[in-house]
Amino acid sequence: MPATSLTGLIHSLRSLWAVELLLVLHRDPGRRWGIDDLVVELRSSRSLVDGLLSRLHEIGLVERQADASYSYRSASPELDMLVGELVRLHAERPLAIAQEIHGGADQKLRAFSDAFKLKKD
């Protein structure tokens, strides 16, 4: 499921934790991160970071090395460009990312609940 827009990328990340992890990895793309290093960097849990790394790998933003380390690696130049836009947006308007992530969930819930509304004749 390749993201084709910044909004699509944000929605595919699904959480602010994933955004933060992506920003850490993107900041130093040549670095190979061990999962324990990422847990410390994000002040998070191993299970959360492991799940986030799996998600980023699915999207095509993380490469797992043979030594079980991880590094930023975009599956395409277009995706890399979107990540660059995300980095800029995070620097300029970080709350916009949170609103997009949480607003997307609200819109799905609203669409689901609207399906059960009774219509007046």
Image: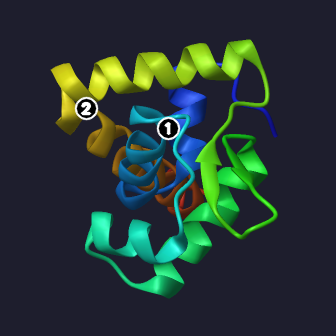
Q: Could you say which quadrant of the image residue 74 lies in? A: top right
**Mark 2 and mark 1 residues within 8 Å of each other at the beta carbon:** no
- Quarter of the picture containing the N terminus is top right
Where in the figure is residue 5, as x and y percent of width and height? 60, 19
Is 114 on the left or on the right of 77, as rendered?
left
Give the crowd class for mark 2: few <14, some 14-19, many >=20 residues within 10 Å: few
Q: Which residue is mark 1?
A: 10
Foreground residue, 61 or 2?
A: 61
Q: Amino acid at mark 1?
A: Ile
Residue 96: which disc?
2
Residue 51: which disc?
none
Where in the figure is residue 89, as x and y percent of width and height? 30, 21
**CA gap, disc 2 to disc 1?**
10 Å
Is 105 on the left or on the right of 55, as rendered?
left
Quick one: label 2 or label 1, which is nearer the N terminus?
1
Q: How is the image coloured?
A: rainbow
Report the residue at 30% width, 64% height from top: 41
Badge 2 element: helix
Q: Could you say which quadrant of the image residue 72 lies in? A: top right
